[in-house]
Image: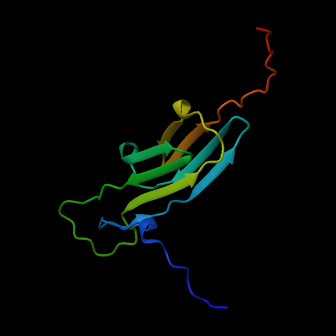
């Protein structure tokens, strides 16, 4: 038995090309009978800087923070870090893509993913030709 880490396939690795830090936002996901609700914490991100993309069962959420510069001030100490947010999820349910809605309030992104109606089984009558 070895404690070696499995080797990654180079084609599966993602290489960063930006200089700002990226954060993984905290997320809560709720399920209702007809929809999934995703709440994403992105403090400091404006509505215009939130991007949500759903394709092939994957929900991608990104948000960019615009740096704040106070004119005539010199920063002495900072604990708040500016950067970007990024999170992706595989969504197992069939989602009605045309009805996805999203909003931002107080640094929380609220995404509603309506489930597609499930196809009903039915008997197909066979006609005599």
Quarter containing the N terminus: bottom right
Q: Nearer the viewer, residue 41 or 92?
A: 92
Question: Is residue 107 in view from this perspective?
Answer: no
Residue 16 on image: x %, y %: 35, 67
Task: Tell me which residue sits at (41%, 47%) in the image.
Answer: 50
Image coloring type: rainbow
Q: Is residue 112 above or below residue 2?
A: above
Residue 83 on image: x %, y %: 37, 63
Number of numbered discs overlaid on the protein picture: 0
In the image: residue 34, left or right of residue 70? right
Q: Residue furthest top?
A: 129
In the image: residue 111, left or right of residue 21? right
Task: Tell me which residue sits at (54%, 44%) in the image.
Answer: 110
Q: Is residue 24 above or below residue 121?
A: below
Task: Tell me which residue sits at (49%, 63%) in the image.
Answer: 24
Residue 98 on image: x %, y %: 52, 30
Q: Nearer the viewer, residue 95 or 64?
A: 95
Quarter containing the C terminus: top right
Task: Tell me which residue sits at (65%, 35%) in the image.
Answer: 115
In the image: residue 92, left or right of residue 106? right
Q: Residue furthest front?
A: 129
Residue 128 is drawn in which quadrant? top right
Question: Is residue 124 in view from this perspective?
Answer: yes
Q: Nearer the viewer, residue 37 or 98?
A: 98
């Amino acid at each position: 038995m070895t404690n070696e880490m499995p080797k990654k396939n180079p084609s599966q690795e993602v290489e960063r090309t930006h200089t700002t830090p990226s954060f993984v936002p905290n997320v809560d996901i709720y399920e209702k009978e007809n929809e999934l609700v995703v709440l994403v914490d992105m403090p400091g991100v404006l509505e215009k800087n939130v991007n949500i993309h759903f394709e092939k069962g994957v929900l991608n959420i990104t948000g960019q923070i615009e740096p704040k510069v106070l004119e005539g001030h010199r920063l002495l100490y900072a604990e708040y870090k500016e950067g970007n947010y990024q999170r992706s999820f595989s969504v197992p349910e069939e989602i009605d893509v045309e009805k996805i809605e999203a909003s931002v309030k107080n640094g929380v992104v609220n995404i509603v993913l309506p489930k597609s109606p499930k196809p009903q089984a039915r008997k197909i009558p066979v006609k005599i030709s």
